[in-house]
Amino acid sequence: MKRALSGHGSTSIIILVAALSLVSCTEQWDEHYYKQAAGKSELSLFEFIESQSDLTIFTSMLQQTGYDTVLNKSQVYTVWAPTNEALQGFDLLDSANVLKIVTGHIAWFSYPVREAQEKTIIMLNNKRIFFTTDGTNHYFDGKLILRQDQAVRNGLVHVLDGYVPYRSNIWEYLLQASGIDSLQTYINSLFSYELDGEASFDENGMLIDSVLESTNYFLTNLGAFDNEDSVYTCVIPDNEGWNEGLARISPYFNILESEGGAAVQTAYSKLYLVNNLFFSGRYKVPVSSETLTSTGGMTFTNPDTLFSGGELIELSNGYVYKTSSFPYLAAESWLKEVRVEAEDSQDNFRLTNNYKVNTTSSVGTGYDVSGGYYITAVPTSSSATSKLFVRFPITSVLSTKYNIYVVFVPSCIIDKTDKRPYKVNFYLSYIDEKGESVSDSKIVSNAITDSTSMTKMLVAENFQFSYCNINTPQNSTVNIRVENAATVKATEYNRTIRIDCIILEPVQ
Amino acid sequence: MNMKKDINITRVNREQICFRPIKSLLVMLLLLITVSAAASVTATDSITGVVRDAKTKQPVNAVRISVINKNKMVVTDENGAFTIAVTSPKDVLLVEAYDYNVVEVPVRGKAHLTIDLYSDVFGDYFKNVNGIGGVNSNSRQINSVKTVSNFSDNQALAADEILQGVLGGDVRSVSRSGISGMGSSLFIRGINSLNANAQPLFVVDGVLWNNLYDITSVHEGFFSNTLEYIDINDIETISVIKDGASIYGSKAANGVILIRTKRGKDPVTKISLNVMQGFVTEPSSVPMMDGEAYRLYAADMFGSAGVSGAGVAELGFTQTDPSNAVYNTYHNNTDWNDEVYQTGRNSHYMIDVTGGDDKAMYYFSLGYADNESVIKETGMNRLNIRLNADLYLTREFDLGLNVGFSRIERDLQDDGVNSYSSPTWLAKIKSPFLSPFLFTSTGEITPDYDDTDEFGIGNPMLVLSNSLNSLKKYRFNIGLAPVYRISPVLTVSSQFDYSLHKTIERRFVPMDGTATRYLDGYGYVENEINSQVMRNTAVFDETRLTYEKRLDKLNHIKALYGFRYLNNYYESDYAVEYNTGSDNNTTITGDYDYLQVDGINDQTRSLSNFLQADYDFDNRYFVSAAVSVDGSSRFGTETESGFSLFGHSYGVFPSINAGWIVSSETFMKSLDFIDFCKLRAGYGITGNDGIQDYENMTYFSIVRFMSEANGLIIGNIANEQLQWETTGKVNLGLDMGLFNEVATVSFDVFSSQTNDLLTLRDAPLISGLGQYWCNGGTMTNKGYELSADAKVLNLNHLKWEVGINVGHYKNEVTALPDGSYTTSVYDGEVLTAVGESAGSFYGYKTNGVFSTDAEAAAAYTDPATGTSTYLLMETEDGEYEKFSAGDMQFEEVVVDGIIDEKDKQVIGDPNPDFYGTISSRIFVDRLSLSTIFTYSIGNDIYNYSRSQLEAGEDFSNQTSAMENRWTGEGQTTTIPRAVYGDPMGNARFSDRWIEDGSYLRLKTVALSYDIPLKSTYIHGFTVWVSANNLMTLTNYLGLDPEVSAGNSVYYQGIDAGLVPATRSYAFGFKFNL
């Protein structure tokens, strides 16, 4: 019985003690749900910065730009606040620059110094700034952080011994830098504007505002120079370099007056001048890579020659080499080999006479056929007098000298026993120096191809084209006509001929 | 001396108790019987006495006094005096008086007795109890049995709520949800199974019910509660049998809950009308971040998710300019909790009629309960009809008839942690700065609900309005209970019952207002339709042959043989489809995406032969032995513990219990303060046949191939040795009445061991079958139960009685066939290991948040070099990441500088140290005030809900504690930094989410008044008001420390975010005609 009573008593005591201990439940509840973390201020970012005696200049910059309001809102930011000492001498009257500096020291989200591991922070002004550490101290754009991780209600404040100057990006540089007026004029001429349908109309199709969206050839074709995430290295000719470039390029783009003349010639010249000025990535001389490909698609084998003559300007999203010369060679830049694959020559423009043309693959034949295909021109007439020919339009021919080749595929590519060569004539159509059209001028007669191997036949050497035909791609002024010179009775020649391509090699 | 001896028995070490108790007990009892028989030679011929009112000490006349079992009865005179002949100094007088409680008074060789009676408003200790052998006086019960009755002034919808409120120390009852009728997880004397049914057996009017413990619903957060079918006003008594239940053999290892429904007793026609009206308060919410705090948090999430500042600046929630068209959309102050919850309403009407004549007695009731839930658009109603009749067809032959019908209809919503379709959860995680309503492009609010927000979180109001979730349940039963008295001592009786239980569930989750989600193995889904129909048909019969004879005035014997048969057929059909294309298409057609169908056809047949013999001597010594022989279609044919007969295997489940009413002995004469003292001891073996059907057989399962065709694969390989779990229980009990019945105490010590635990074992890899069921492993439960009641005040107009009910058990897994294993539950792990309690939480321990990087850098010291460095974690990519400032510091078990699986340890135990109730009943004339506290001490809770609301890993709104998260070097806090996706696993399953679930709850306060009426027709009119859950003292950080995420042992102590219990108030009256 004593045990029973004892058990009862002890149990009651346990329950009583437990009940009393549970009385503190509200305290524990509040402790968990409402207690503020030690070391965390309830002030807003702006209130905190305002409360710091060594940040009064930055405080006034925030107020000046309206960012005092922004930093009081319920959005998370990290502010790298420069001290008064760091901002000594800064021109607060330059409102535009003040805004740039303010937005260059604020970033969305919270970045404690634990993340300072070569991390790139995107600031409100879209600039990328390095947040780094040496293991002991932490740096923002190389400036020492004096007081770190000041946690407040809506973010973090790091106090910075210095400030991050505003750096333009390439696009801003192109539009605003001095000394490159010629280039800027050209860029400005390439802006076009379209109505932004999504922004201009509501969901019911009603026009609510005419919002114009601008585009520019540079941004759409050569690179996203306004994007801080896209990094480029650029060769930017100043006015002198621009003029030199134009002077060197213009002769290659001589255009008939009837097709636009000098105006079009200048337009093409400028286009080919700028097309290879930009390269993705950051490069400093010496460039470690042996070749670089421009955003215009040309590959340069010795990039140092492009950059070494220029003045290096570091921008937020890349480097500019500003140059007073035009360091490009014609052969590496605008003057390239013209190659017309016979099989690619459009039926609409390729002319045939008494030939039926088939495209044939060379795969597995062992012959080095350009593009892997050639055309087979099969006679459709056995008439002894009928002319058999194929006429190829040649586009993108510049006003300079070329060696002209026609490449044939031997008959034995199909039938190894067929050792018959081709016997052919060649005609050239072009615009002469007087601006008059010369049609099917015979330039080679009865040329005989190799019967067992590919034949790269020179049909014109150092032929000077007076006008470029780049402006008339669908109505080419330059044509090569390949005519079969073998008669029906001349059975030692094959009247079915196989053509690989036409090549116009510029003469340097 | 003898008393001392008995105390010594309790000191025998537990192993001896478990395995050698019966023999010792029998020897002792025989010795005592011999001694006491010799003492009876000195019997007094007659004794005198006086009966008084315990308060006034005034004599009470017309008190009926009889000698138990001796056929002697007298009545007190006007002076309260009586003289009665006794045959033995050990006789016991039964004292019965109108308006007073019955008492049993031992003579103990005294010549004169003074007996004080207490008003019958106090608890009646010597009441009749519905035990295993039928109804008998509480004083003669030798099993550990508790019975409760009379629940009319109660808000409870189902019997489990009664158990929790009244017998909380005898049955650990944990409510599953605050939604009415969701039921409770019930555990009697610890946990007796790991993988099988651990819930007690329900026996209603002698019929074994399928408790459907493992039935899942298509509605998340909904539980099927079998007890919901019974209106509590139909219940006469609920008894909890905690030991000695071997006649229920292979089904009784988890204890037995006997429910008896009301029957006609009195030929006078009585009509009773019960009416209840009540309301339930809205659940509150844990403190969540307000809109501005969420705005900051969301920015953190976007930032750590890799979204650029420019990208975030274009989102609606960052717009700060009021002139911006979307500004209004993102600048509201919505209390989402208030949007989805409402004040609930309960009503309950019940009318019953009893009466009859000498040919038949009947009880008929009609009940209707209507509930408007605290979750908007949800509720339930229940219709109950019951007819219990007893037909006295001849002098020898009676026929009992039980007919019951229940229909329950529910409108539901998914509940709990579910970011997709649970409006209550969406209300928690939805940003407060958003509105339920859509805004136009010019910023004007519209009456239309908005869709999923830019954080990917749906609109709970659209889910509420567009979901079509319903559940309909029906249960019909008809029972026949013939009784034929072959002779005065021999009776044959039977209980036949047929029941049909059907559930129809329908669920439609709309596409409007819910986020598109990815379904593993299928694809993206926008909306979802589920349908499930379940039928359970049971045929039951139990036939008993009972022999009962009083051999003489001292010896009484009762024996019974019984045969029980149960055929249970369970069938379910399930289908789900997705992407109906429109929220107007809400029915399954087979034409939509990812159709999946499933079904179950389980037929279980079990039979039992049982034998029970009870003997008592001189109303002092009691012995009861029982054995049952059980067979089941779930058993293999070659079980190790059973025997084989006719190709089937049978288990044998014996028990023996004994009792000694010590207080009747003459040596207790001098101990006047002990009115009643009974010692009980028993040992019994019971089983658990809660094996899934057909697991002893090889069978094929249907599989769907490429969504094109059905095929068959081997689903299981036979295990002919598969058998029941076997639980041996030892019980020692002491029941006492003290200080002239001022206090009563009942104390039980128990120890049980479960062998042959059902466990899943890996099949040979080559078989490709995964796992199969087998037996192996043991588990023990040791503990005690205490209940005590005391009459604190007994004044003329004021009476006060208090009671306490305490349960305690210590569960321990003692052997496992294949070693330790863990079970994944709600992103956590539950460990099953030797030496640990079942359900133990297994995860990481934490030592706070690294305040500084320097602190993190010194977290691990290499024992070889003495250098300090960061703790590391291996990522999925095979790289090692540092735990640095702002991360949790996890404790290492294996000190190697790397936090991984090896560092997991037991971090919590959901099993309580103590649990039970504290009650108080105060009576002021006709007014009574009843108060019940429930409590649980020492149990841990895995707060899964909080683990989701403080994970800091996605765009879900978080609790206000998240405002305390680490954001910068040097901060001292308990909440780590918030990073999208939680790459360092700071929110992993750890002791961050394990909390002390101890609580003390003011469960019920009920005030009733019996209105005095002088009417021939109205026999009683009682009005009452009650309130539930008025106050809870707890340190738990969730809404409700009473949590159970399911019936499985592994789901105990897990807060799955279901609707918490809230305060409810009710008014009712009872009208008797």
Image (cartoon, coloured by chain):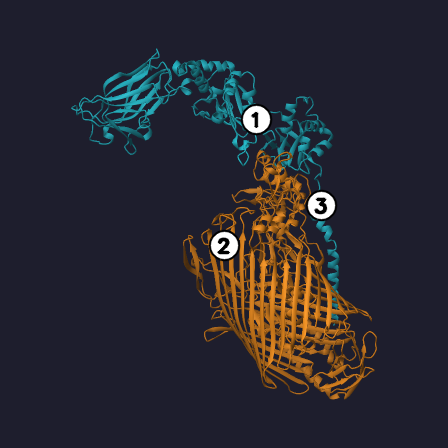
Chain colours: A cyan, B orange
Nearest to the eye among marks 3 and 2: give it: 2
Residue B343 point in image, percent of width and height = 67, 55
Residue B42 point in image, percent of width and height = 75, 88
- Screen quadrant of the N terminus of chain A: bottom right
Chain that bears disc 1: A
Q: Earlier in the sequence, mark 1 or mark 3?
A: 3
Residue B38 or residue B513, whichever sits in front: B513
Few, some or many residues within 10 Å of mark 3 (<14, 14–19, 20+):
some
Residue displayed at 45% across by 57% down: B765
The residue that label 3 is drawn on is A35
Residue A445 or residue B1050, whichever sits in front: A445
The residue that label 1 is drawn on is A316
Residue A258 or residue B826, whichever sits in front: A258
On the same chain, marks 3 and 2? The answer is no
- Mark 3 belongs to which amino acid? Lys
Q: Secondary structure at mark 2?
A: loop
Residue A326 or residue B500, whichever sits in front: B500
On the same chain, marks 2 and 1? The answer is no
Residue B18 point in image, percent of width and height = 62, 71
Q: Is residue A434 left or right of residue B419?
A: left
Task: Place residue A133 in its image quadrant.
Answer: top right
Task: Place residue A112 in its image quadrant.
Answer: top right
Q: Is residue B281 above or below residue B648?
A: above
Looking at the rendered structure, which numbered label has been put on residue B587? 2
Q: Is residue B192 above or below residue B140?
A: above
Chain that bears disc 3: A
**Distance CA(mark 3)–CA(mark 2):** 50 Å
Q: Is residue B586 above or below residue A406?
A: below
- Mark 1 belongs to which amino acid? Ser
**Distance CA(mark 1)–CA(mark 3):** 43 Å
